[in-house]
Amino acid sequence: MLLEIANLAGGMGNSMVTITLPWLVLELTGSAARAGLVAGLVTLPALVAAPVAGWLVDRWGRRQVSIASDVLSALSVAAIPVVAALDGLTFPAVAALAVVGATFDPAGYTGRRSLLVDVAEATDVPLDRANGIHQGVFAVGWMVGPLVGAVLIATVGAVASFWAPFGLFVLAAVAVTAMGVGDAGQRARAARQGEGGELGGWSGAMLGLTTLWRDRALRTVTVAVIVLAAVYLPTESVILPTYFERQGSPASLGIVIAALAAGGAIGAFSYGWLRLPPAVSHHRPPVDHRHRHRHCAHGAAATTALAVAAFVLGLAWGPMDPLLSSLVQQRVDDDIQGRVFGVQLSLFYAAPPLAMVATGIAIEGWGLAATYLAIAVTLVAVSVVLVTRPGLAHLDG
């Protein structure tokens, strides 16, 4: 419960900042280009910070890094109303504070995700069920956060709204501090040090990338999900807004985006049910579970490609995040998991923004219908490749 309180608070806090920050820039400058610039800038630190966060999680401990990240995130968002009260906000100040805050976010996300193994062990909750709950709660946070942020902007103003994510990040830090669990990563690291097998320096920092690359099945699913996300996410951020803006129907856009988010949350929550029979309680499941890893990957990829309804699309995509978490937890040594999660998170931050830019250019050149047809064809092609890749045969090995 404490972990999911932190997870919900962190998701809500980050999602509130994603809408409050560009709104604040628009109020200060009246420039949509500058608002877009800040939105792009906040994605850049994660490309470097996510792998570093994974290394810190493995080196310093999962709880310690999660707590420190949330405290620093809280201070970074509180700095905006404080600076506004003292000297007045300028665009460079807002941009700088936004980049600083975005630098801390990956560590909190990676730390909480890594803690799932320890929480599952301490509470006797099956690991796959814990992963589904965790990703579902995070999706709920990202769904509720913007709604709360919009209400606060309308009632207390954009600047004062930043006190809400400040409180949420503090709550996340307090919840993780109160958790009474061990740290499997630190135990495994101590054992490796005792055997003289721990890598230091650059080799140790790059171990997450090399571990991910050497595991054929994990590499296949990671690359496939990155490609699917890069093709799928522009639907939410570029295709649908463009279509409904041309239709003059912002309410319809909100309904469709909410349906996508709701389907994704339900899909994530259902992952534990898909993977385990109710009688199984050990956090590392046996081989004879209801659906094997590769079946979940096949179903999620194929359904995502063929879905035409927003809810079904979100429902199909929902199990992919908990699936990736389960694969890392079950196939990677405990003292390396943070670095693998960090590498994956960095790749996920990099691919979709590039695809969004490409999608916008394609709409200008080809038109909306042709661009979306190309996205649909690409999704089908990627899904077919994923289903037929021999690496998936080793997912349950």
Image (spheres, helix red, strand yellow):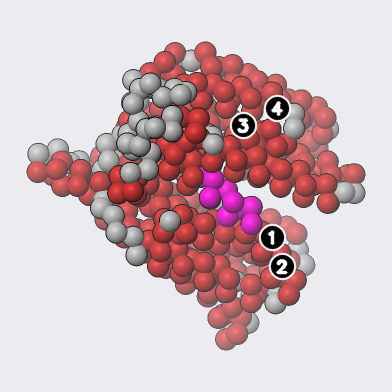
Q: Amino acid at mark 2?
A: Val
Write the residue at 64% across / 77% down: 160
Mark with earlier residue (4, 1): 1
Mark with earlier residue (3, 2): 2
Using the numbered discs, state the Cα–Cα distance from disc 4 to disc 2 in whole angstroms.
Answer: 32 Å
Which corner quadrant holds the C terminus? Answer: top left
Q: Amino acid at mark 1?
A: Leu
Q: Which residue does the numbered mark 1 point to in the structure image?
A: 147
Asked if one can make out residue 208 in the rendered structure from this viewpoint, the answer is: no
- Confirm or deny contact between disc 3 and disc 4 (CB under 8 A): yes
Dot 3, how many residues are within 10 Å of its Cα: few (below 14), some (14-19), or many (20+)?
many
Using the numbered discs, state the Cα–Cα distance from disc 3 to disc 2 in whole angstroms.
Answer: 30 Å
Element class at badge 2? helix
Dot 2, how many residues are within 10 Å of its Cα: few (below 14), some (14-19), or many (20+)?
few
**Residue farthest along the bottom direction in this orientation:** 86
Which of these two is toward me, 22 or 384? 384
- Confirm or deny contact between disc 2 and disc 1 (CB under 8 A): yes
Which of these two is toward me, 11 or 175? 175
- Looking at the rendering, the stretch of residues picked out in magenta corresponds to 135-144
Q: Which residue does the numbered mark 2 point to in the structure image?
A: 151
Dot 4, how many residues are within 10 Å of its Cα: few (below 14), some (14-19), or many (20+)?
some
Using the numbered discs, state the Cα–Cα distance from disc 4 to disc 1 in whole angstroms.
Answer: 26 Å
Q: Which residue does the numbered mark 4 point to in the structure image?
A: 307
Asked if one can make out residue 71 in the rendered structure from this viewpoint, the answer is: yes
- x and y percentages locating residue 29 in the rendered image: 73, 69
